[in-house]
Image (cartoon, rainbow, N blue to C red):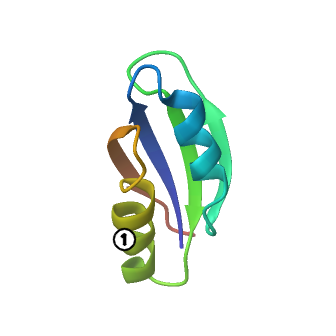
Amino acid sequence: MVAFVLCKLVAGLEQKALTQIRDIGGVKDVFLTFGSWDAILTAEADTIDKLSGLIVREIRGIHGVQTTETLVTTNL
């Protein structure tokens, strides 16, 4: 299961948060953006429950991550 995770980061804590995000198992790519979101991540997990845990506990648990929005993909 793959998801795109849109992240809004706290000003001044972006680099520290991004370093920690890159080290999370299951986070495959990190793209910096301009606009409403500061970064877009791709995350992978075997199940929706594992994906939820990855996002809720690990990504949102990082000091400097203000908010996220998750777009879950499906293979057609």
Q: Residue shown at 52%/29% (left/top)?
A: 14
In the rendered view of the protein, which quadrant contains the N terminus? bottom right
Q: Which residue is at the front of the view, 12 or 27?
A: 12
Amino acid under label 1?
A: Ser
- Helix, strand or loop status at disc 1: helix
Residue at figure coordinates x 52%, y 40% from the top left: 17
Horizontal side of residue 15 vs 61, given as left or right: right
For this view, does 34 lie left or right of residue 10?
right
Bin the neighbour count of mark 1 within 10 Å (Cα to Cα): few under 14, some 14-19, many 20 and up. Answer: few
Q: Position of residue 59 (x, y in %)?
A: 44, 56
Which residue is located at x 41 percent, y 52 percent? 71
Quarter of image, res 72: bottom left
* Residue to which mark 1 is pinned: 52
Judging depth in this view, the residue of 18 and 16 nearest the camera is 16
The percent coordinates of residue 63 (x first, y second) are: 40, 44
Q: Give the tally of numbered discs.
A: 1
Q: Is residue 44 above or below residue 19?
A: below
| Image quadrant in which the C terminus is located | bottom right
Q: Is residue 75 above or below residue 61?
A: below
Residue lying furthest top: 35
Q: Residue at x 61, y 68 (%)?
A: 26
Q: Is residue 65 above or below residue 59?
A: above
